[in-house]
Amino acid sequence: MTIEEIKKFFDNDRFATGIGSVIESAEPGHAVISLNVEDKHLNGNNVVQGGVIFTIADFSCAVAACADGTISVSADGNIAYLRPGTGKKLFAEASCIKAGKKISYYETLISDENGAKIAKASFTMFRIAQ
């Protein structure tokens, strides 16, 4: 799929795009998602809410896994929060570690515009038969 086709397909992901996630780059097995941090993304401690960080991590894996034109969904996801998200922009970069016929394993690093590592996540992705 071209980047334009990938972006058009994921326009239908109303939650991820609704919070402001933007596909910066995508190719099979790799994707980068960005998010401009707004007040609505902050929790009571004035840092980015963990669910927002998890969402962009999950979204980056979905984009990377589906970029070859085959629909994949998350079967499992884990995240480790490394430091509070205090930047103005976040990036989630997903990479395929192991690709299988049905199951693939992805890792995502979430960082801010200054390169500070905010979280690290891993996802097992399941390819849906089409």
Image (cartoon, grey):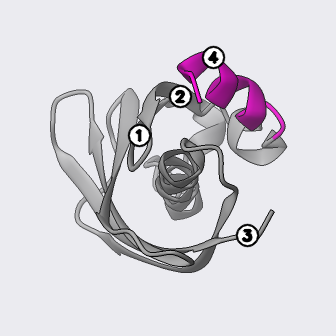
Q: Earlier in the sequence, mark 1 or mark 2?
A: 2
CB-based contact (under 8 Å), mark 3 and mark 4: no
Residue indicated by mark 1? 31
Give the number of the mark in front: 1 or 3.
3
Marking on residue 128: 3
Helix, strand or loop for disc 3: loop
Residue indicated by mark 2? 23
| Residue at x 39%, y 50% (from the top left corner) | 29
| Residue at x 84%, y 37% (from the top left corner) | 12
Q: Earlier in the sequence, mark 1 or mark 3?
A: 1
Q: Is residue 85 left or right of residue 6?
A: left
Amino acid carrying label 1: it is Ala
CB-based contact (under 8 Å), mark 4 and mark 2: no
Helix, strand or loop for disc 1: strand
Give the number of the mark in front: 4 or 2.
4
Judge the density around disc 2: few (<14), some (14-19), many (≥20) Cα neighbours within 10 Å.
many
Q: Earlier in the sequence, mark 4 or mark 2?
A: 4
Amino acid carrying label 2: it is Ile
Amino acid carrying label 4: it is Glu
